[in-house]
Amino acid sequence: PKRPMNAFHFFSADFRSNKKELLQGVRLGECTKILTQEWKKLSDREKAPYLEKSKEMRIVYAKEMEEYKKEVSKLTPVGIDTSL
């Protein structure tokens, strides 16, 4: 399973989709600085939806990882005698 995004990544995706004109033509490094500054300006209340989404995705990831580990543990390497 793919690791979940953190709250900042959810914010970044949302900000980019809503502020395309602000970030148009801006280099990646500068874009990251702008996103970081905007994230720091947010209050805890404004960050809450992104933090909640991140929390939900971590729970989903943990469940998927648990399932994955169960499946992997059922597999035995080919050509290795496991009867020892």
Image (cartoon, rainbow, N blue to C red):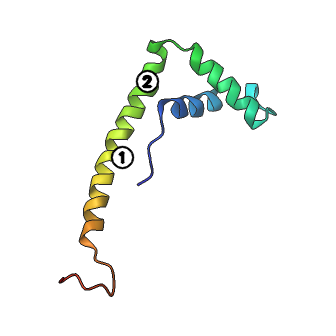
Question: Identity of the amino acid at label 1?
Answer: Tyr
Quadrant in which residue 21 is drawn: top right
Left/right placement of residue 72 relative to residue 83 reads right
Please state the horizontal and vertical placement of residue 41, each as a whole percent of the image: 59, 13
Please state the horizontal and vertical placement of residue 56, each as a whole percent of the image: 35, 35
**Quadrant location, the N terminus:** bottom left
Mark 2: secondary structure: helix
Q: Mark 1 points at which residue?
A: 61
Q: Name the residue under label 2.
A: 49
Q: Residue at x 27, y 57 (%)?
A: 67
Q: Is residue 19 visible?
A: no
Q: For marks 2 and 1, give the one nearer the viewer.
A: 1
Mark 1: secondary structure: helix
Q: Residue at x 36, y 46 (%)?
A: 61
Please state the horizontal and vertical placement of residue 27, each as a whole percent of the image: 79, 35
- Relative to residue 69, is residue 76 depicted above or below? below
Question: Identity of the amino acid at label 2?
Answer: Pro
Q: Which residue is drawn at 31% across and 46% down?
A: 62
Left/right placement of residue 11 relative to residue 67 reads right
**Quadrant location, the C terminus:** bottom left
Q: Which of 21 and 49 is in front in this view?
A: 49
Mark 1 crowdedness (10 Å alpha carbons): few <14, some 14-19, many ≥20: some
